[in-house]
Every structure is written in structure tokens, then in C-alpha cells.
Amino acid sequence: MFTGAACWLIVSSLLGLIASIKFHSPTFLADCSWMTYGRVHPAATNALLYGFAVQSGLAVLLWVFARQGGTPLIHPFLIGGAAKIWNLGVLLGIAGIIRGSGSGFENLEMPRYAVCFLFASYLVIALVATITLHHRKERDLQPSQWFLFAALLWFPWIYSTANLLLLKFQVRGVTQAIIAWWFSANLITVWLALIGIAALFCIVPKLVKRPLYSSHYALFAFWTLLLFGTWTGVPFGAPTPAWMPAMSAVATLMLIIPAIAVAKNICGTIKGDCVALKSNPAGLFVQFAVPAFLLSTLMHCAASLPCLNAITNMTWFTVAQTHLQVYGFYAMSIFAAFYYLAPHVSGFAISAKFAKLHFILMALGVAVLVIPLAIAGIAQGLKLNDPSIPAVDVAKGTIPFLRAATTGELLILLGNVAFFANIAGLATLFAKKQFALCCADDSCDAKIAEVKA
Amino acid sequence: MKYGPIVFLAAFFALSTSWFGFVLKPQADLGRAQQETNVVSSLLYPQPRPGQARQGAEVYRADGCFYCHSQQVGQTGVACDVVMTSPGTNLTAAAEAVVKANPMLASANLTEFLSKLPATVLKNITRDQADAALKLLKAPDMKVEVHIVPTGPDITRGWGRRHNVAADYVYDWPVMLGSQRVGPDLANVGARLPDANWQLLHLYSPQAQVKGSTMPSFRFLFETRKIGRVPATDALQLTGDQAPPAGYEVVPKPEAHELVAYLLSLNSDAPLYEEPFTTPAPPPAQTNSIAAK
């Protein structure tokens, strides 16, 4: 599953790069309908969200359930098969979007036939994960398991609701837009956060060899994230009944509470012990993911204040925040989890140099992507609010920033290639070992490795 | 939180709150919306789009136009203008009333003011101020109107005359409100830029129509082909370096015509009971300069 996720990550960043180039050279690939911005951009987003984010999240989830529960994963072959179906679904979905069958709802562009594959595959994985959790030897659930188990339930609910009501039994009028916003918020603000936080809560104590600072903080963050996060999404000024954007704005503002609780909990666990943290390449990624989560939530909160929202609404600022959430926080947490679990699972050490290269490329890439986009968004918003500035000049004004963001996309692409190389190297070593042993290893770790490698 | 079922219930409870709020509630409130007789024009609003425009919506969706163009006009508030349409029979009384309502006009040439109709007596005031002014503006046969003017940057730009509401999207599927304004809002592009030929030329080469535009060209919606016995009637009139080689013509594919039909059908400028306005339609101006706004 990690290999699949890494492939999609590269596909996504490649498509993202093409989409990004299009902003400063509008004639680039203009003669081909398959490569128009309105298709490449959603293809990139979907490859990132479904190809990488959800898939790698599930891989981490399975590992945590098996590891924390002290039990082998049941039916690993089912997981392997389901992962293949998932990847097939993503492939079909991306091809559908490029062909022009995108659904027209942001973050839900995959056509119906692809959604069926994804949903079926998810159900199988969720079932296996739940049974694995049920068989745990350590009966008390750890905080990371709460977050993951909630996430396991969250996704099928939001995904089925959104797809059924938008693509199958189509609801009327602006309700569609509200459901699509509800879905996006619950996926990006809640689901990704649940998995990312769980990954951090699981590996940080192991890295510094100290228990999690406070399970009460974790419980508090869990409840507040679920209760407030799920109400976010409807943007300011939307053509809906006015209570909806107002409700979302308040809920978004409240998200700062779980973010601070999570950050405090992780900092308390580390207790300034950066040496222990840095002994493993995973620590580097943790050091980036936690501030990125705080900053992304802060940006989200700031943008929900009416005075700032009037500026940032419908600008690149929102895009910058989403990128920070997905790349800066979520992907970094997943990478951290990977660099921690991969040597354990496969029995081979990862070249620390290569991991560091991956980290530097990603960190630089995220910074060079998010900062210019955020500045571009604020400049764009200020200008859009001044009717004397023509829209053409507003768009032209953002071009230098978008050029910088393209550099960021390029760096992220290179980082993703490094990540893929790491996985591929590990998988080759592992396959060689398996071949040499030529026998099935019954230990829990090897079984999971089979699934993931 | 030691047990699985408790975590399950917690997540179930949290998600069900927003599911009731953002899925069930809007569906119950808005899901059965129908077209209604407009209070001003007594026509049914909104009208379903004609067939070609509906096909064009599919092109708009497939090519992802909504990633750069929103379809929702915003509004920051409402102001009132007091406008006199007729000074009536007694000009002296009318002039006195006008000065009473707006003392600033005392220094202006009142005779000229009263002769140029309709004349705006007060601009950009609240509803209460307008009501107070109406009481002062009393003269024999004098006719005074209060205009309701939505305000906000989008409206000043000419993107629409009021902000959009749920009733504007009853017949759209999918509803493509957009989340980004790389380009201008298109909620009323059909009213703003009603020239189909201009739309086609703009899709073919945005930069030739609007200087400095960052919009990508949609050349794949057009076909460059050899001129047959008779040139196509809908061939684009291209000049300069845009022009095709001699003996060739650039003809819009059906998709291009459909997309333009959809764009021209985008018009949500009808005054509604809940969103009233009485501003007149903007005067016609040069198309390229409107597009740049």
C-alpha cells in the first residue's frame, strides 16, 4: 500500500506541476483537452487525496492496530487484494477525470464507477482492521487507537453520503454544494487530522521512549476535533441560509482548541529531548508536522474571522491552507510513521542520508509552495475588494507568487521521488530476503510487511 | 475511552450532529424548492436552461471552468437612493422640498437639477433616512421613488446586481459555485457579455480579446480545417497572427457552441422578494472593457 501511495504521490505532484505551470503560461499544452487546467488540477487533487492520503492513512492504521494490539493482522491477503482494488479505482477515477467525466464537485470528482471500487475496497480494509482491533491482546485502547477507529468509521459515512446524494440520488439546488463542502471539510479537516494525530501520538512516545504526556489532553483533543471539525466547511457569503456559514465559522474558530491540545501533548512527550527525536529520521518529519498542523489550523481559524474572511474568501489563501494541511502536516506525519515502522517491519535500516534528503526537499517544497500562495491570496483578496482594480490586473498580480509556488511543486515532486526510491530500495531488499528464506514468516511484522511492501 | 464501542459511539454522535445539520436540514429546507412566480416581473423564476445550454453545462463541468471562476456574487449591504421622477406642477414648492430633504443641494443650480430627470436627491442612505426624506419631499404632484441598491465590490464591478441566493440554483446539476476567483465571477456573464461571437473568440484566444488575461486558451473546442466549397457560416473572424493559414478556417466544434450557450444562459439578475433591488441595468459599454473587470 505504501508503494501504491508513493506512486500516486508522484502522479499527483506531476499533474500538480503541470497545472501550476499553466497559470503563468496559458498556452502550455493548450491544444489538448486532456491536459486543460480544469482536468489536470482535479486529477492531481484526487491522486493526492485518494491515491496517497487515504491509502497511506489506512496502511498506518493497520500497522498501529496490529502493533499496539500486539496481534497479527488477520487475513493479510484480503488487505493485499483490497489495496489492489483501491489502486484500480483510483486509476479509473483519474482516467475518468482526465477524459472529462469529473463530477463537478470539488474533492469528489471521481466518476461513479470509480467510487464503487474505492468504497468496496475501503469496506474490506475497514472490516479487517476492526477485527484486528477486536483481537487485540492489550485490551485498553490507546489514544492513537481512538483517533484511528473514529477515522475508520468517518470515511465510509461521509463518502457514501456525499456520493449517493450527489451522483446517484441527486439532491436539488444549492444543497449539493452544502453536502460537497461538508464532505471536503470532514475529509481534509477531520479525517486527515485524525490519522495524522494518531500517527504522531503513536510514534513520538516510541521515539523518545517515554509514554504520551497526557491521555486527558488526548481525550479532550479527540472530542473537540470531532465536534467542531465536523461542522466546518461552508464558506462565508455562500448562497445558503445564513446560519450555515456562521455555524461553520464558529466551528472553525474552535478548532484552535484541539490543535493546541495536540501540540501541547506532543511537546510534553518530547520534553525538549531533540537528541532522541533526531536519532531516527522519523523525528525530523515529526518536527515539521507538528508546527505545520498548528499553523494550518491557525490559518484556517484566521480565515474564518469575518474581517479577514472578506479578504481571503475565494483566493489562493484557502489553497495555501489546504496544501499546508495535506502536505505540511498530514504527509509529513505519514512519512514519519513510515520511517519509524519500515525498518521494524522489514528488518532493514533505511539509509538515513536518503531520508534526510527526502525531508529537506519536502520541507523546502512545502515552504516554497505555501508561503507564496498565502501572500498571493491576501494580495488577491485585497485587490478583489477594490473594484477600481480590474480582475485581469488582479490575476496578473498573483503570477510572480504562482511562479514561486511552481518551484515548490517541483521540490515536492523531487521529494516524492526520493520517498519512492526509499520504498523501492527497501522493497527490493525485503523481496531478496524473502526469496532467500523461501519460507513464510509467521511473525506479525513480516505479515504486515508483505501487505505493505 | 478504553473500549471500542465507546469510541465508536463518540464518533457516531459527533458526525451525526453535522450530518443532521448540513445534510438532512438543507435537504428538508431547500430540497423541494420549485420555481416561483417573480413578484416584480410575474414570470416564473428560475427558468430551466434550454437544451443546448444544459449540454454546455456538461462542457463547463468536464473542463473544470469552475476551478477558476466562481458563480456566486457577494454583497456587503444594501443602501437606498431617493430619486425624483417628476417635480410636479409647482416647481418652487418642489425646489423647497428638495432643499429641505437634502440641504447640500441648496448651493447647486436647482432649476437645472429639477429639469434633468430622474434626479437623485439623496444617495447611499439607510432605509430610515429614506423614509424620513420621503416625508419631507412633499409638493403638488411630485413623484419620488426610493431605489434599493445592493452594495459591495462584486456589485460595483458589475458582476451582478444583487448577491446570489439558493433560489438561483434550483435547476442546476451539478451546482458549480466555485471556490476560487482566478478569473471574474460568471454568475451573470450572460447578462454582462451577451455577444456569442465575442465569447467564441475569447475561448479561442483569451489574450487577443482581453489583454494580459491569464486564462488558458480552449483551442481544442475549435477545429482548423480547409475551407470547403462554401466557407462555414460560424467560422471565427480572426486577424493578425491568430488567423489560420490561407485556405483554412477555424470553426467552433459543437461543444464550443454549447459552452457559449451555457455562458449566455448564466443570468441571475432577477429581483426576488427576499433580495429586492431596483437598480437599472448598466448601460452598454465596450465588451472587452467589461470583460476585463
Image (cartoon, coloured by chain):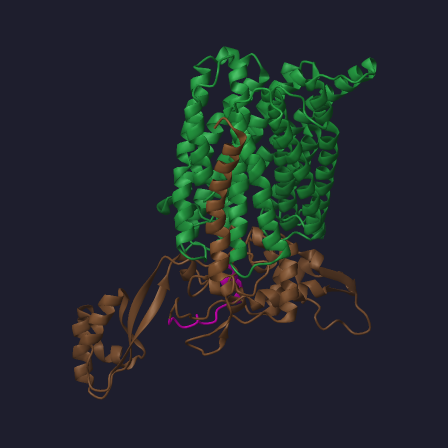
Chain colours: A green, B brown
Taking the spot 46% from the left edge, 71% from the top edge, the residue there is B270
Residue A296 in the image, given as x and y percentages of width and height: 47, 34
Q: Quadrant of the C terminus of chain A?
A: top right
Residue A166 in the image, given as x and y percentages of width and height: 60, 54
Residue A200 in the image, given as x and y percentages of width and height: 52, 24
Q: Is residue B214 something one can see in this rendering?
A: no
Q: Main secondary structure of the magenta part?
A: loop
- Which residue is more in the foreground, A299 or A178? A178
Q: Quadrant of the N terminus of chain A?
A: top right
Q: Is residue A388 above or below residue A83?
A: below
Taking the spot 39% from the left edge, 67% from the top edge, the residue there is B274
Q: Specify the segment rendered in magenta.
A: B278-293
Q: Is residue B206 above or below residue B95?
A: above
Q: Is residue B147 above or below residue A304?
A: below
Q: Is residue B248 left or right of residue A260?
A: right
Taking the spot 25% from the left edge, 80% from the top edge, the residue there is B114
Extreme residue in the bottom direction:
B89
